[in-house]
Image (spheres, coloured by chain):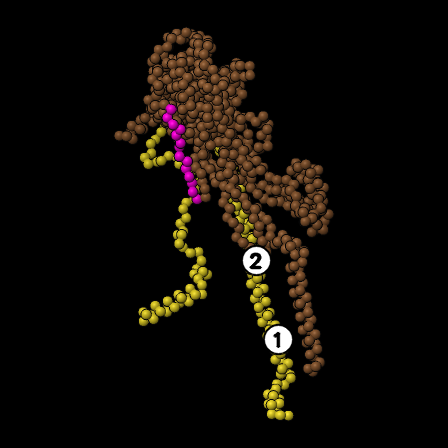
Amino acid sequence: MKSENSWRYSMMFTAFIGVGLVIAVQLVRLQFSPQASSFIEQAARYAWEPRLVNAPRGQIYDRWGNLLAGNRTVYEVGVELAYVEDPQAIAFTIHGLLGEDYARVLRLASMEASDEAVYNRLSDFTSVDNVEILKNQIDQRREDIRASIPPTGPNLEGLVFRAHLARSFPEGLLAATILGFVGQDEIGYHGIEEYYDELLAGTSQEIWVPRDPNRVEELPEIPPGDSLVLTIDRELQAMVEEILDNSVEEWDAAGGTIVVMDPNTGEIYAMASTPHLNPNEFSNYDAVFPDNAPFNWATSKSYEPGSVFKIFTMAAAIDLGLVTPETPFFDTGEIIVGEIPIRNWDNNAWGPQNMLSCMQHSLNVCLAWVGTQLKAGNFYDYMRRFGFGHITGIDIAGEATGRLKEPGDGDWYPADLGTNTFGQGISVTPVQMLMAISAIANEGHMVTPHIVRSLVDGSNQFNIQPQFAGQPISSETARIMTEMLTETLENKESLALVSGIRVAGKSGTGEISTLDGYSDRTNASFVGWGPVDDPQFIVYVWLEDPTPIWGSLVAAPVFKQVVERLVVSLNLPPDNVRIGLLEDSSE
Amino acid sequence: MNNKQKIIQAYQQAPWRKQRQIIGIYSAGIVFTALIASIYLNVTARSATLGREIQDMQVMKEEIEKEIEDLETELATLTSARVMEERARDLGFEYINPATSLYLPIPGYPGRQTADLAPPPPTISATSQSLPPEFTMTLFDWAREMIQQISLQTGAN
């Protein structure tokens, strides 16, 4: 019995040991074989897979929390080459539904699957609706095959869909020139999207996750981009855009801009300019803005402002004590500055005047005389202090600097002093004008315009404080200028006057310069603020090349329209009611 | 046959008994190995199932985050300025005429407040534990605690 079984046991023992030894030797041999690194690489390749963890782009809200820029799900459509059965059907369908180039899709879908070629992207930013159509076609065909009936739809096997987020602007055109847009490369262009791109974008990460569920790891928490709350009032913005579009059409203007700002804080309530592009359809950019045309006229387009600039000349002279509103001036209709004659807008002599009537009648000769009293050094010193010639620092991408020629510059001539005093030969942007005007409306203190009110970073909201940009003139000068510019509007029964609310302001008509000199076309503008005893808003209106050409005729009524609606949004009662309420509350 | 051989023979087990012992030992080894393997398989399978569920939840979390973004944008589209103005007009609303408006002071009313989008501070105390101590304390911690309790009870008696 013992001898009969022992050889069997020995054989089995030997076989087990032998097989074990072979496996052990093979394991050791593989570890040190020339192919070892290749095997390790293959194992690593199949053990892990890459995954892009997206950080959603931060959202943008108006001051009341209305969403202006959010995100929506879109799909990348691609093919897994190993599973493609009919590349032509895929190419035909993708071309027909998504508009992709047929030959390109066919080439990508027809590639042989290999270690190097596994997946090809056919299209991106595909809408949910289109992906649903494609998925339904795939499901329908599979259903037909399962039911053993001849499939009717195209064979789209191999198509795969990867969801990701893309920028979406639910308000469409509203505030488009403020917001900018986000391209397919997920980079912000123009406006807020470009200026705050790094904050908004967050940081997406590609991480490697194990396929083996036993090795599952916690995915890193990738925070979304920071969200922004703007100073913009959505309803006010919509209203201002509507008024601007109507005005451009009514006055047959080439374009224009309207900006509304709080003179106390620099918060921009509304900023409209033409043309505007629906940021959801940014592929139309070249058609709407040919030849790199300025995206936002309010910040990026400089122009010669004309007579609205007289405000700063007069403010400088009053601040230095050279003139008062009652200072007399005899207008002969012409003054020579730098050997160049300067005449009034109507080429007439207006005879005996004072500084108040000079501003009321917008007399170039008078303001050029004021400039000569100031002399170039003082004049340009004040203009620098008002912020002309350099950017304001508003938080919108692409701000232009304008141009303030000064003595010492190669292209400055003494005659420039004369023309600069009434806003010709100098170029500014509307936001520069707003910032400078804020000094007049805000007791001499100039505020930096800004468009972002708060930054929301996870669980914290940081409110941005107003930034003051100096005090170019005294409080007394600011009050005198405000009163002068209120009286001038009231004396000439300006079209800018608003029932119930006292406003100060000045119109301007600047000739547009061309390569052949000044043309008949004009920049018509108006800047005004109110209520004059406690200014709560500044409104700047600029229409390019309107008909008629005068700012007092086309821009002033636009100012009035804006203010009439603005006071409702700001909950600003008529002066008599407001003052009455203040008196009641103080008793 | 000497005494030594006699003793060995006297205490020698029968061949069939030896065979059963060997079979028993082998069987015990196989059963033990099978037991360990089955426990290992069970634990591994449960771990793999949980791992897969975690992976599914990670995907689901991403999908839910996308859905939230979609819904927020859709809500904003449905309540956009243009849509709301059209709805207001359809309902017969008109723009306010400031000249004919009646202004009433409301003591204590701060006016319309600007957006405050930061989430409220968490109400859960930072020191509260999310897991019971059974899942976090070591065997030594447990033993120390038990000894302390016993010594306290002894001291109290």
Q: With respect to residue A177, does A165 lie above or below?
A: below
Q: Can residue A563 be seen in this view?
A: no
Residue A501: x and y, percent? 37, 23
Residue B80: x and y, percent? 50, 34
Q: Chain B is drawn in which colour?
A: yellow
Label annotation for residue A214? 2
Residue at image position (43%, 35%) is A453
Residue A354, quarter of the rendered image = top left
Q: Which chain carries label 1?
A: B
Residue at image position (41%, 48%) is B122
Which class describes the residues within 10 Å of circle 2: few (<14), some (14-19), or many (20+)? some
The amino acid type, in three-letter code, at marker 2 is Asn
Residue A436 vs residue B51: left or right?
Answer: left
Magenta residues, start to end:
A459-472
Residue A352, quarter of the rendered image = top left
Residue hosting label 1: B26
Task: Tell me, by letter, which chain the rendering colours brown.
Answer: A
* Chief SS of the magenta region: loop
Residue at image position (46%, 24%) is A389
Q: With respect to residue A94, does A470 lie above or below?
A: above
Q: Mark 2 lies on which chain?
A: A
- Verify whether residue A462 appears in magenta: yes
